[in-house]
Image (spheres, rainbow, N blue to C red):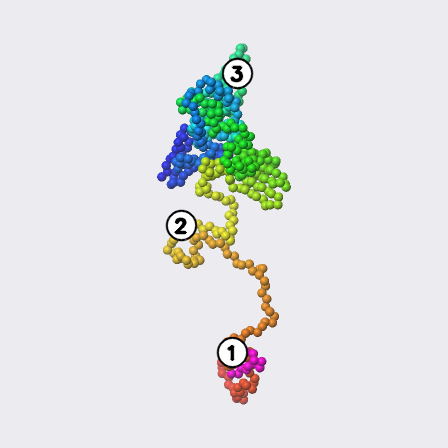
Amino acid sequence: MARTIKPALSKSPLSRVLAVAGGVAVAAVFSLSGLGQAIVIDSHGNAGPSIDRRYAQVEATKVELPSQQIDARGHQDILRALVAEQGFAMRPFPKGKKGLTLVANGKLSPSGEGYVAAITEQGLSVKPGDRVVLSNIRIDKEKIVFDINGGPEHKHEFLRHIQIGVGGPNMTNPVVQDPDQEPIGSRITLSFSKYVPEVTPAQVKSLLAPLISFDMKTPVQAYTDTLPPKLKEAILNHRVMVGMNTDMVLFAMGQPETKSRETEGQMPFEEWIYGHPPQDVSFVRVNGNRVIRVEIAKLGQPLEVFTKDEVEGLMMTNGRPVLAEATRPGVQLGDVHRNPETQSADAPPSLRAPGETLPSDPPPGTLSTGSREGPMKPVIFPKDTTKDPARTVPAHPKPAAPTDDDDDDAAKPGAAKPADGSGTAMPASPADQPAAKPSDAGTPKTLLPAEK
């Protein structure tokens, strides 16, 4: 019986119905264009579904907060020290007025599916590793609001719609000259329990550490700090892995020296080429925003080809790929080539259950030419004898050794022994042979009808 399961986030437009029929789970996969990432929503009701680590829940900070409420002097210290302060984004930031809400020494909201839904609906404002600017700070009773890169609202939300003039509708001018470009900034809200305590600018930076890093870094360091250790090491060592997105490739290798667009079957791709002989030459094949093949040509060595995705599992919270291998069957295009010496062919299709036998089947251990059940054995080819040495027959063979039959023949009467003492029997002489009986040559013989 099929049952319906609704995700916990019912208000999100990405909420959907996941059906589980016959104990088989159905997983919904959502991909984000431009980020090259995906998440999986598990329908088994697990507490921690497999999800891209950039959208997972943050690790809570441990900053000691004072018990006193912030005063006017503390307001001025925070505004003076943090307005126009620059840092590096540790996660993707969505556009929109709601933005992200981080509880001091607590959790991030939204996270997981809600995080992805916010970016899908509002759009992406900042990518991980990008430089951000705290353009405006507002301190309320229980929270501190930070506008990132100009914020999600126009600077003059009301005055930009008012025009004043004399002499007709075409003689008016807007009160505020505001560009028509839509804001692309984001917003982060740092929330406290009852009131904003008397925190220092350094403590505020520590509380925002899961989202923004204010350390002095190069762009490469800022970007690699948002990645898993193995992926970070590969980029710092200038090594490209299958599954990287184009940003990772650019941080690892820089701009390619040559680009070429080609098509393989129905799939278009770009070939990024790095290096010149006699140095190593790398061919990076990119489809969309993802590396699907890497070839490394070294002087005097065979071509190294890498096609296995090594990044997909690293970007997930549990270290596993987006879909389990058991639920994603492998599909080979074209003919399947097997080695007949080591691999046997698949069993022919059958309606029998595994291990089922019929009364007409031969007993186990007996051979039957009519039965074809079970996997076929590897093909055994006859031995090639074309390179074996040719068989030769001597022109003067040696005499064969005497046998028991020869001894019996020599013992018979009428068989003469050789004079040289050899075991070969010689024919008897006429004198030794018995006398022949007289013949009836003179008597006429009458022929019978049958003998005529």
Image quadrant holding the N terminus, namely top left
Judged by depth in the image, the label closer to the viewer, 3 or 1, is 1
Is-magenta flag for residue 360? no
Query: Is the stretch drawn in magenta largely helix, strand or loop?
Result: loop
The residue lying toward the viewer, choosing from 204 and 411, is 204
The residue that label 1 is drawn on is 407
**Percent from the top left, x then y, of residue 2?**
37, 38
- Taking the spot 44% from the left edge, 27% from the top edge, the residue there is 63
Give me the disc on residue 354.
Answer: 2
Amino acid on which disc 2 is placed: Pro
Q: Say whether disc 2 or disc 1 marks the residue closer to the N-terminus.
A: 2
Judged by depth in the image, the label closer to the viewer, 2 or 1, is 1
Amino acid on which disc 3 is placed: Val
Query: Where, by quadrant of the figure, is residue 365 drawn?
Result: bottom left
Amino acid on which disc 1 is placed: Asp
233 to 106, vertically: above or below? below
**Percent from the top left, x then y, of residue 448?**
49, 83
Give me the disc on residue 176.
Answer: 3
- Taking the spot 45% from the left edge, 25% from the top edge, the residue there is 190
Q: Real-space Cα distance between discs 3 and 2? A: 79 Å
Using a 10 Å C-alpha cutoff, classify the residue at mark 3 as few (fewer than 14 neighbours), some (14 to 19) or many (20 or more): some
Q: Real-space Cα distance between discs 2 and 1? A: 68 Å
Q: Secondary structure at mark 1?
A: helix
Q: Secondary structure at mark 3?
A: loop
Q: Residue furthest left?
A: 1
Q: Which residues are magenta?
A: 413-423
